[in-house]
Image: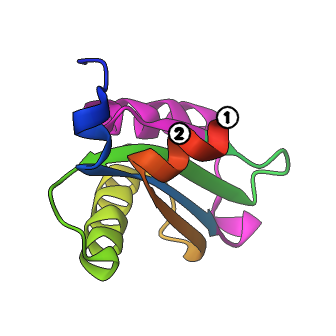
Amino acid sequence: MQPRTLASLERGWTIDIDAVGDLADVDDEFDDKLTEFERALEPFSGAVAGGEQRERYGARFSLDTDSVNPIEVLEQGLLIFHDAAIEAGLPPWQVVRCEILTYEEDEADAR
């Protein structure tokens, strides 16, 4: 992964998505599936988390794109999230939170 420069900050987005669902959908391999979820998101510098009660999972990842259309970015982000969750074998739960920030805004929030 290349470090982000000021020029690249304007060409991408940080995406946070959380999904929540029924505990009946959770099996003993939930933690292993979270590891696979993170592995599936590696190309997007992804990090994942799961709820202590195993009732939710989420991810934060990057999307390098020249698009300035937030609807297009959110749609792409949701596809990436869902594809990675399916690949990991996680339940297809309801998305309950989405946040997208340009790299520039994400960096400003971090300060």
Q: Is residue 14 above or below residue 107?
A: below
Residue 57 x/y as whole percent = 63, 53
**Residue found at x 32% / y 81%:** 71
Of the numbered discs in the image, which one, if any, rests on residue 12?
Answer: none
User: Residue type at mark 1?
Assistant: Arg
The answer to whether residue 28 shows anywhere in this view is no
What secondary structure is found at the residue carrying circle 1?
A: loop
Q: Is residue 54 above or below residue 4?
A: below
Q: Is residue 36 above or below residue 103?
A: above
Residue 51 falls left or right of residue 3: right
Residue 96 x/y as whole percent = 63, 76
The magenta-colored residue range is 20-48
Q: Nearer the viewer, residue 43 or 64?
A: 64
State which quarter of the image contains the N terminus.
top left
Residue 104 falls left or right of residue 106: left
Q: Is residue 34 magenta?
A: yes
Residue under label 2, please give it.
Answer: 107
Q: Kindly report the distance in space between the C-alpha atoms of the residues bearing marks 1 and 2.
A: 7 Å
Residue furthest left in the image: 66
State which quarter of the image contains the C terminus.
top right
Q: Residues within 10 Å of mark 1 (few under 14, many from 20)?
A: few
Q: Are marks 1 and 2 in contact (CB under 8 Å)?
A: yes
**Residue found at x 29% / y 26%:** 5
Residue 24 falls left or right of residue 98: right
Residue under label 1, please give it.
Answer: 111
Q: Nearer the viewer, residue 99 or 96?
A: 99
Residue furthest top in the image: 2
**Residue found at x 18% / y 53%:** 65
Residue 20: name its quadrant: bottom right
User: Residue type at mark 2?
Assistant: Glu
Residue 31 x/y as whole percent = 62, 34
